[in-house]
Image (cartoon, rainbow, N blue to C red):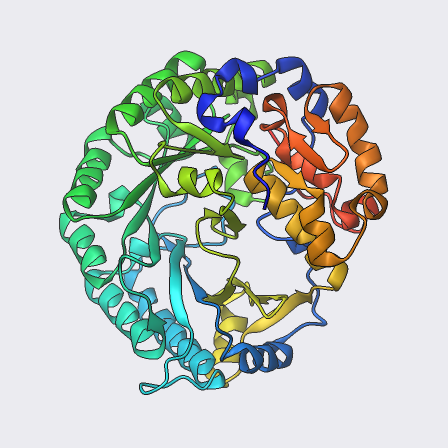
């Protein structure tokens, strides 16, 4: 693909280039994060277990690599800001029957694809354990689950794959970090959100600087190739001054990647958020002040703005992949791995296989019933049309490259880009007038001020939002 980003290289951008308060206020509306297209509200129950089984069998011998996602739903405490699908419990024995179900589902997938010890099929180049809290599992359970996965699937060597896990430092000691590396994980994502004790108390996540630093240092000693830290702005009692202290600590930690998420207060959708007093939330202006200050500080510390909420060091794989036009996006966020089939395992997980999305049951009882009966626990999904694939590629390249080369799409999809997307390009004329994008005869370039608003720009190409078919249950873009 033509390099359209070189003259606005992210590594040279400053905070003033990215942050335009007037335009952010104008365009700050709700919209998808585009970890998938079509987005999850378009999934329906007309796609189920039978379709999934046929699709797995059809793609079993595809030459492209595989990605696996494993969902561990348990947390021992509830963080009030959280909107994830989780089960809050201090009964650690609840993991035992769930692991048995996971192993049965792994066998069902591998058997359907015809994989066995002599033929493990497509190479797995990406693995992600998410949750919940994956380190809710003890060391032996982690060993067992990874052994099962490697027994049934053909894993790439350590230096060829991205094998990542989300961890809670409060649920992870030095021995567990060593076990994670021992079984094959080479990347780690660690939740922090904020170190201020008043903020932590308000969101019920008490986590010290010392225990976080201890896990980070141990991960480095054990040879983890990349470490990400999650932060969140817009939480109760946050101010520019208090969050600045958290940023100082994080920058001193010097993680490879930092995710700076916007707290979306949606108590009607997420019950734990009802425990947050809305009067304690920062004002809309203070929230924007925190974001602006954070962007400036991270860029000054040498981080590169990758896109959406993500920052990475200049020598990080994400930064290099973006510069080379090889960055991708999936349910786990940005990735350097090519757009490959993703198999979801566990309650509520979502996969993307053979040009279709498949989601497992969200209810543990329904998931259990399906797996114990020897059936796939898929309850809904979406089979992409040719038009969906085209728009999915357009939105992905926008999110990853901040640019579109019309000629590339015309050659690959046999269209006239300007004719096919006439409505979208017309909508973007206002964005161009505001200095967010540059519309050329054969290309679209997102200008620096448009990068924070990339979700808005991508929405112009979303056929379902245009037809108002998708539900408006999205968070605000900023």
Q: Position of residue 63 (x, y in %)?
A: 48, 73
Q: Position of residue 312 (x, y in %)?
A: 39, 34
Residue 211 vs residue 95: left or right? left
- Quarter holding the C terminus is top right
Q: Position of residue 19 (x, y in %)?
A: 57, 18
Residue 291 vs residue 387: left or right? left
89 or 69: nearer the viewer: 69
> Quarter-wise, where is residue 59 in the image?
bottom right
**Can I make out residue 238 in this image?**
no
The image shows residue 297, relative to residue 384, as above or below, that is above
The residue depicted at 31 percent of the width and 85 percent of the height is 117
Residue 413 vs residue 64: left or right? right
> Quarter-wise, where is residue 268 in the image?
top right
How many discs appear? 0
> Quarter-wise, where is residue 419 in the image?
top right
The residue depicted at 59 percent of the width and 46 percent of the height is 1
Q: Position of residue 334 (x, y in %)?
A: 48, 45
**Can I make out residue 287 in this image?**
yes
64 or 172: nearer the viewer: 64
256 or 202: nearer the viewer: 256
């Amino acid at each position: 693909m033509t390099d359209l980003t070189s003259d606005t290289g992210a590594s040279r951008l400053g905070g003033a280039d990215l942050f335009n308060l007037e335009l952010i206020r104008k365009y700050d509306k709700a919209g998808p994060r585009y970890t998938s297209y079509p987005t999850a509200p378009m999934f329906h129950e007309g796609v189920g277990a039978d379709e999934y089984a046929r699709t797995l069998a059809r793609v079993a011998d595809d030459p492209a690599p595989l990605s696996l996602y494993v969902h561990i739903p348990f947390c021992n405490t509830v963080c009030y800001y959280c909107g994830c699908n989780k089960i809050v419990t201090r009964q650690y024995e609840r993991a035992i029957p769930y692991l048995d179900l996971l192993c049965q589902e792994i066998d069902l997938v591998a058997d359907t694809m015809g994989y066995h010890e002599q033929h493990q099929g497509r190479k797995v180049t990406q693995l992600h354990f998410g949750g919940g809290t994956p380190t809710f599992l003890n060391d032996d359970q982690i060993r067992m689950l990874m052994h099962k996965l490697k027994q049934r699937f053909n894993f790439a060597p350590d230096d060829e794959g991205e094998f990542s896990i989300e961890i809670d430092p409060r649920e992870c000691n030095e021995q567990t970090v060593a076990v994670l590396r021992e079984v094959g994980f080479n990347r780690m994502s660690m939740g922090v959100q904020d170190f201020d004790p008043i903020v932590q108390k308000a969101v019920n996540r008490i986590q010290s600087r010392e225990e976080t630093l201890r896990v980070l240092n141990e991960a480095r000693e054990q040879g983890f190739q990349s470490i990400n830290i999650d932060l969140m702005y817009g939480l109760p009692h946050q101010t520019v001054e208090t969050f600045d202290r958290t940023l100082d600590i994080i920058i001193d930690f010097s993680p490879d990647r930092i995710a700076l998420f916007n707290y979306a207060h949606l108590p009607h959708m997420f019950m734990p958020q009802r425990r947050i007093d809305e009067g304690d939330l920062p004002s809309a202006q203070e929230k924007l002040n925190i974001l602006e200050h954070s962007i400036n500080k991270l860029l000054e510390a040498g981080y590169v703005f990758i896109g959406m909420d993500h920052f990475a060091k200049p020598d990080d794989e994400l930064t290099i992949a973006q510069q080379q036009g090889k960055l991708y996006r999936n349910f786990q966020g940005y990735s350097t791995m090519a757009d490959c089939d993703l198999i979801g395992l566990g309650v509520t997980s979502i996969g993307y296989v053979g040009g279709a999305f498949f989601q497992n049951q969200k209810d543990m009882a329904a998931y259990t019933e399906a797996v114990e009966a020897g059936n796939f626990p898929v309850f809904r999904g979406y089979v992409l049309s040719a038009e969906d694939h085209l728009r999915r590629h357009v939105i992905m390249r926008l999110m990853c490259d901040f640019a579109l080369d019309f000629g590339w799409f015309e050659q690959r999809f046999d269209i006239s880009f300007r004719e096919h997307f006439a409505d979208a390009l017309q909508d973007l004329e206002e964005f161009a007038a505001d200095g967010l994008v540059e519309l050329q005869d054969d290309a679209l370039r997102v200008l620096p001020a448009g990068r924070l608003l990339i979700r808005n720009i991508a929405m112009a190409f979303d056929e379902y939002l245009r037809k108002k078919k998708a539900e408006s249950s999205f968070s605000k873009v900023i």
